[in-house]
Amino acid sequence: MTTYVAFLRAINLGPNRKFPKADIVAATEGAGFTGVATHINTGNVRLDTAMRSRARIEQALETAYADRAGFAVPTIVFSASELAAIADEAVRLSEERGPLERHYLYLMKSEPEADRVAALLERDRAVDEVVVSGRVTHLLFGAGYQPGAVDPYGVEKALGVVATNRNLNVVRTLAEKWC
């Protein structure tokens, strides 16, 4: 059995996309996964499975979640070891860049095409930086960042991928808790 962490996109936003933790657990277990746990109500799910194909795991979860929730729930899956490496890289990036106001990670279903990454990286500004690493995009907001839109770069649209975002604290906590 291998441990995976699934990140659910766009749940519990507004009145029409409610998907309570108890329903997420029931749907995940109903799809045949074990060791299921959740962390806060934003769609972070730990699970164990003998399945090795990330695409098959994502498909099984998306089918179970759509059946239970009544709407599509895009799901991005990483193995526990991948999540630990993502958290380590995120902490390193934050420490190297000095004090940051915010650090968001966009966890992507697939790796973006190189030309789309290049176009996104050209949009860096003086107070922030974008780092794309495999299936993760880091938005690093430095001193002078004015809170507003979480994603002023439009990462998902710019890279042409399905993604969901979490802040550094959530990713680090999940890695410490589940990896």
Image (spheres, rainbow, N blue to C red):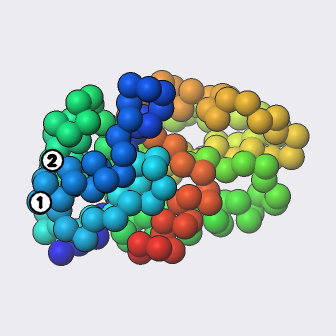
Q: Earlier in the sequence, mark 2 or mark 1?
A: 1
Label 1 packing within 10 angstroms: few (<14), some (14-19), many (20+) = few
Q: Is the Cβ of the residue at disc 2 closer than 8 Å to that at disc 1?
A: yes
Residue at image position (67%, 50%) is 103
Under tag 2, what secondary structure? helix
Q: Nearer the viewer, residue 31 or 126?
A: 31
Expressed as whole percent of the image width and height from the top left, the position of residue 135 reads 42, 48
Quarter of the figure with residue 110: top left
- Mark 1 is on which residue type? Gly
Q: Position of residue 48 (x, y in %)?
A: 23, 68
Residue name at image x 72 percent, y 48 percent: 102
Q: Residue at x 28, y 48 (%)?
A: 23
- Residue at 34 percent of width and 65 percent of height: 37
- Side (left or right) of 36 relative to 136: left
- Identify whether 143 is placed above or below 94: above
Amino acid carrying label 2: it is: Ala
**Which residue is identified by label 1?**
32
Q: Quadrant of residue 146?
A: top right
Is residue 176 visible in the rendered image? The answer is yes
Mark whose residue sits in front, 2 or 1: 1
Q: CA distance from mark 2 to mark 1?
A: 9 Å
Quadrant of residue 51 within the rendered picture: bottom left
User: Is residue 119 depicted above or below 169 in this figure?
Assistant: above
Residue 58 horizontal side relative to residue 159, left or right: left
Residue picked out by circle 2: 60
Task: Assign the C terminus to one quadrant of the image.
Answer: bottom left
Q: Residues within 10 Å of mark 2 (few under 14, many from 20)?
A: some
Where 14 falls versus 126 (above or below)?
above
Q: Is residue 127 above or below residue 14?
A: below
